[in-house]
Image (cartoon, rainbow, N blue to C red):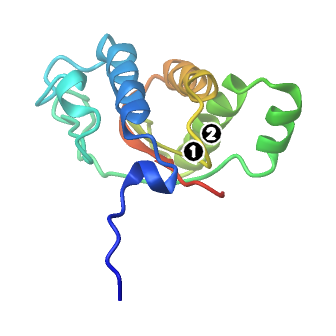
Amino acid sequence: MKKTKNSYRKSGVNIQLANKFVKHIAKLTNKNVQKKNLASNEENIGAFGSTFDISNSKIKDPLIVSCTDGVGTKIDLANKLKKFDTIGIDLVAMCVNDLIVQGAKPLFFLDYIAVGKLNLKKVKSILKGIIKGCDISNCKLIGGETAEMPGI
């Protein structure tokens, strides 16, 4: 069996473009990072995990409530209208709604963006909406995942 050298580039994944987007995320979110966070977002974003200090939340006997949601078929509408920031806002809103019905207060948000091919203009617009949704909900975007999956 002949060995072939595989690479992200050959599979259609652009690591350099993804890294550029991660730096963009860090710059946009660093201004909103909490003061007592263990690391600035420029150090934290892209690290496959994140920290959030709950000690300054003034919540007596805190419990962590978590949820996840997606935008579903709204992505089809966003593609037709070529307007992507609204799905970012909607994504945060759906998750926050799931939290507040449990009596919880949103503190932080982790995003997940999956695309067939990374388009910086589109993902920056989605990110802009996510950050706006977090601002409206008084929570912080502290990390997440951007997945480029050719053929999807």
Instruction: Give the SS element for disc 1.
Output: helix
Instruction: Mark 1: give few (<14), some (14-19) or many (20+) Cα within 10 Å.
Output: some
The x and y percentages for residue 33 are: 28, 20
Q: Is residue 8 above or below residue 26?
A: below
CA gap between label 1 and label 2 equals: 7 Å
**Disc 1 and disc 2 in contact, CB within 8 angstroms:** yes
Is 64 rendered above or below residue 21? below
Give, as a three-letter code, the residue at label 1.
Cys
Q: Is residue 25 left or right of residue 93?
A: left
Tally of numbered tags: 2
Q: Residue at x 45, y 40 (%)?
A: 14
Viewer-proximal residue among 137 and 101 = 137
What label sits on residue 76 in the rendered view? none
Residue 95 disc label? 1
Residue placed at 53% from the left, 54% from the top?
Answer: 68
Between circles 1 and 2, the one closer to the viewer is 2
> Which image quarter: residue 74?
top right
Residue 39's spot in the image, x, y percent? 13, 28
Q: Is residue 87 above or below residue 69?
A: above
Left or right of 68, for residue 107: left
Per the rendering, the mark at residue 91 is 2
Of the pair 74 and 62, the residue shown nearer to us: 74
Kind of element beneath mark 2: helix
Residue visible at 57% across and 36% down?
92
Q: The C terminus is located in which quarter?
A: bottom right
Q: Residue furthest front?
A: 2
The three-letter amino acid code for the residue at tag 2 is Leu
